[in-house]
Amino acid sequence: MIDRAVLKKLKQVDISKDKEKTKARVRELWTKLDKESRDKVLGLADIAKITVERTYKNGTITPKLTAAFASLHNINPFYITGESDSMDGYSEDVLLKFLKDKNAEKQRRKKVVPKKAAKADAPAEVKKAPQRNAAPAEGNTDADAEFKKQFAKVDQIIRILSKAGSLSADKLASLNNMPEEEIIYLIKAQLYRSKYSADADDITFFIKFLLTV
């Protein structure tokens, strides 16, 4: 029987080559064992019962469990991992060679360096669409004046909306129920007021804005 100290050095990695075969074979082997034999497998492999149950559910198996099954019940380890269809042919030399091969295989996988992905062709340059409301270039006084004018209009609307948001519910209700004649009168009064007071410009502009949208 293989020494437990040897198994302790083995890594907990999956070495199954055929998950379906490993699942079926471990399930068959395990169900045939009595409690004492099962405890020996668990003790030699130094694992919990749940590890064996996981093996016959998903087909993954570690070198420790493979070696414990093989050593205690004279089973070809390559049969357990699905690499051979024969249970016969076990010997301690075969088992040691099996573990040596698995360790070498693991080391080879570590040394494999993935190739760098080839650089993708540089994407074609996409022409950017001209930005709306972009600031005019320096020195273009006409465009600069127009930009400031448009910005001032937006600023006026923002100020009016901020004032409207502070109105109480009662005031908003009275505005909603105001007769049409009074609304027309207020609009005319506001237009007249804006001729003599710069403070009324915001309200006047907003009324004109609402009539155009």
Image: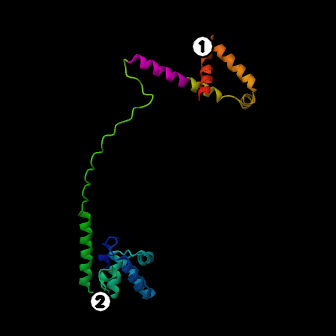
Contact between labelled residues 2 and 1, with CB atoms less than 8 Å apart = no
Under circle 1, the secondary element is helix
Mark 1 or mark 2, which has the lower sequence index?
2
Q: Quadrant of residue 197?
A: top right
Answer few, some or many: residues within 10 Å of disc 2's Cα (few below 14, many 20 plus, some between 14 and 19).
few
Look at 30% across and 43% down and name the residue there: 124
- Residue 54 is left or right of residue 213, and the answer is left
Q: Quadrant of residue 96?
A: bottom left
Under circle 2, the secondary element is loop
Q: Is residue 145 above or below residue 49?
A: above
Look at 50% across and 23% down and name the residue there: 150
The three-letter amino acid code for the residue at tag 2 is: Asp
| Magenta region, residue range | 140-155
Which residue is nearer to you in this view: 179 or 197? 179
Q: Quadrant of the N terminus?
A: bottom left
Report x, y in % for residue 105: 25, 71
- Residue 99 is left or right of residue 170, and the answer is left
Principal SS element in the magenta part? Answer: helix
| Dot in front, 1 or 2 | 1
Report x, y in % for residue 22: 37, 79
Task: Find out whether residue 144 is within the magenta segment.
Answer: yes
Q: Quadrant of residue 75?
A: bottom left
Task: Find out whether residue 79 is within the magenta segment.
Answer: no
Answer few, some or many: residues within 10 Å of disc 1's Cα (few below 14, many 20 plus, some between 14 and 19).
few
The residue that disc 2 covers is 88
The three-letter amino acid code for the residue at tag 1 is: Ala
Look at 26% across and 66% down and name the residue there: 109
Which labelled disc corresponds to residue 198?
A: 1
Distance CA(mark 1)–CA(mark 2): 105 Å
Which residue is nearer to you in this view: 4 or 127? 127
Q: Is residue 134 above or below residue 84?
A: above
Q: Is residue 161 above or below residue 46?
A: above
